[in-house]
């Protein structure tokens, strides 16, 4: 037998032994298996009789192909369970058998997730072996009291100079990255995921293109940081409840590692597509649209998801959350953007105008802020950041006058200083894709920029 065949055989035997061990340790229900029957199907919404399951439960529905379709209970009406398919409704028929699956409202977590890419159900999508996840965790999280959340006291190094220096993040902070489509959110997230300082990084790619998911996994699952990253991905062509579940599952994974006392970075791209998924579910259930078509429960889902990040006084761990928010039509007053801005501890706004100039990252510094920065950095850094913000705002405000030649030197001392430092400011704010600068050097570069002025 060839060495390659022997290795493949040994791997298959090892996976088989792992499956046997998992089966032996799995609890076996002694009672009867709950089953029901499909009585109605309207698109992806299935009405099931005889299966009274709580909301959040999973079930398997037989189809005419001899396989089973996975569905989730999202409500109930007149004694019937309302289930949303986690796939397509092809080959379903009336009176198809439905059986309950797993533990309602719980997902499997464990250290085996490190270095792996999974879907919203915890199944590997990276071609690796099956995961042995012995622990259960509530999908919607374990709610803590307000006084159990520790304050943000330590600075967080995200690896991006402009954010480190001018909107310094803290361990346990929730920060939003807000922009329209095609302005550079995903590239900025990719840089942060590859260079931020954290014990564990959990990345949720919700509603992204499948190609982007594949590219991200290939980049971040091959280097030295692989053992500290978990990717939860559900592309745009999947069912809305699967997209929402992926965001909740990623938050559950982050909470689990926080309960072990670890510092976790949770990146969710994007919060807007989570809100879109929650809106689709709410409209299917008949909830009326309110704010520009978003039902109240869709915006409430955003708030509940963001509130799961933060510091834990009980375990000493932390979840630092970075959430991208897509501003539909570049409207920064979009309901999702406005809701996220109100609940987050800071936001970074990306400018399409800067992106069109080739300025990366295209951070609109005057419009961006961190609500915890003043408590994390020395007063000299705070003062320098405020001064640089004022210079950038003056330069951008007088840009049209300068370009038309209508401005004369001496008319505005602040604008004169900004124009004199223009090249140095641009060099400070720009950063090559894939490059990183640590927190300390970022603050030192800020102080040196204004000291040399």
Image (cartoon, rainbow, N blue to C red):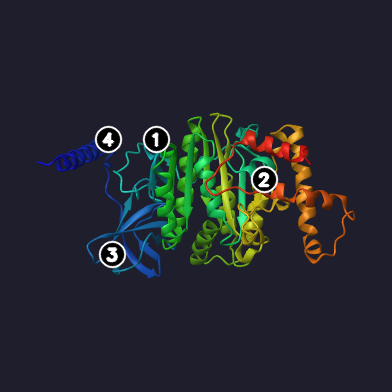
In the picture of the structure, the residue carrying the numbered disc 1 is: 111
Instruction: Give the distance between the C-alpha atoms of the residues marked 4 and 3, in whole angstroms.
Output: 31 Å
- Identify the mark nearer the N-term, 4 or 2: 4
Q: Secondary structure at mark 4?
A: helix
- Residue 430 visible from this viewpoint: yes
Q: Which residue is mark 4?
A: 25
The local crowd at label 2, few if under 14, some if 14 to 19, many if 20 or more residues have their Cα within 10 Å, is some
Q: Nearer the viewer, mark 1 or mark 2?
A: 2
Q: Which residue is mark 2?
A: 428
- Which label's residue is closer to the chain start, 4 or 3? 4
Closer to the camera: disc 4 or disc 2? 2
The answer for how far apart the CA atoms under marks 4 and 2 are is 56 Å
Whichever of labels 1 and 2 marks the residue nearer the N terminus, that label is: 1
The nearer-to-camera label among 3 and 2 is: 2
Q: Secondary structure at mark 1?
A: helix
Work out whether 132 lies above or below 123: above
Which of the two labelled residues, at mark 3 and mark 1, occupies the earlier sequence position?
3
Local secondary structure at mark 2: helix
């Amino acid at each position: 037998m060839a060495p390659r065949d022997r290795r493949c055989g040994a791997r298959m035997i090892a996976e088989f032994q792992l499956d046997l061990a998992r089966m032996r340790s799995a609890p076996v229900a002694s009672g009867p298996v709950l089953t029901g029957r499909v009585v109605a199907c309207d698109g992806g919404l299935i009405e099931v009789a005889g299966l009274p399951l709580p909301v959040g439960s999973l079930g398997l529905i037989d189809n005419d192909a001899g396989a089973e379709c996975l569905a989730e209970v999202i409500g109930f009406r007149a004694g019937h369970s309302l289930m949303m398919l986690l796939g397509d409704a092809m080959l379903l028929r009336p009176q198809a058998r439905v059986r309950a699956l797993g533990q309602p409202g719980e997902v499997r977590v464990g250290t085996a997730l490190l270095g792996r890419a999974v879907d919203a159900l915890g199944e590997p999508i990276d071609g690796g072996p099956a995961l042995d996840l012995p622990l259960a965790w509530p999908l919607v999280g374990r709610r803590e009291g307000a006084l159990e959340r520790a304050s943000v006291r330590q600075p967080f190094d995200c690896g991006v100079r402009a954010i480190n220096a001018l909107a310094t993040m803290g361990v346990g902070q929730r920060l939003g990255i807000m922009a329209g489509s095609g302005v550079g959110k995903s590239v900025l997230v990719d840089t942060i995921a590859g260079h931020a300082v954290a014990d564990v990084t959990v990345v949720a790619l919700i509603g992204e293109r499948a190609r982007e998911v594949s590219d991200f996994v290939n980049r971040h699952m091959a280097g030295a940081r692989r053992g500290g990253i978990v990717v939860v991905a559900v592309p745009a062509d999947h069912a809305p409840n699967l997209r929402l579940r992926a965001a909740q599952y990623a938050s559950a994974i982050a909470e689990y590692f926080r309960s072990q006392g670890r510092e976790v970075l949770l990146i969710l791209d994007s919060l807007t597509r989570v809100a879109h998924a929650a809106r689709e579910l709410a409209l299917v259930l008949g909830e009326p649209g309110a704010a520009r078509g978003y039902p109240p429960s869709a915006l409430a889902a955003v708030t509940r998801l963001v509130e799961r990040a933060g510091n834990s006084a009980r375990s000493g761990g932390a979840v630092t959350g970075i959430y991208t928010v897509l501003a539909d039509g570049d409207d920064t007053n979009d309901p999702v953007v406005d809701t996220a801005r109100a609940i987050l501890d800071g936001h970074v706004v990306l400018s399409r105008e800067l992106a069109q100039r080739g300025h990366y990252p295209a951070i609109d510094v005057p419009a961006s802020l961190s609500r915890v920065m003043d408590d994390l950095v020395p007063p000299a850094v705070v003062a320098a950041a405020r001064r640089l913000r004022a210079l950038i705002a003056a330069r951008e405000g007088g840009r049209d006058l300068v370009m038309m030649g209508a401005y004369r030197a001496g008319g505005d001392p602040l604008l004169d200083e900004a124009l004199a430092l223009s090249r140095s400011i641009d060099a400070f704010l720009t950063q090559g894709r894939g490059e990183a600068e640590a927190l300390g050097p970022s603050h030192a570069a800020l102080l040196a920029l204004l000291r040399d002025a």
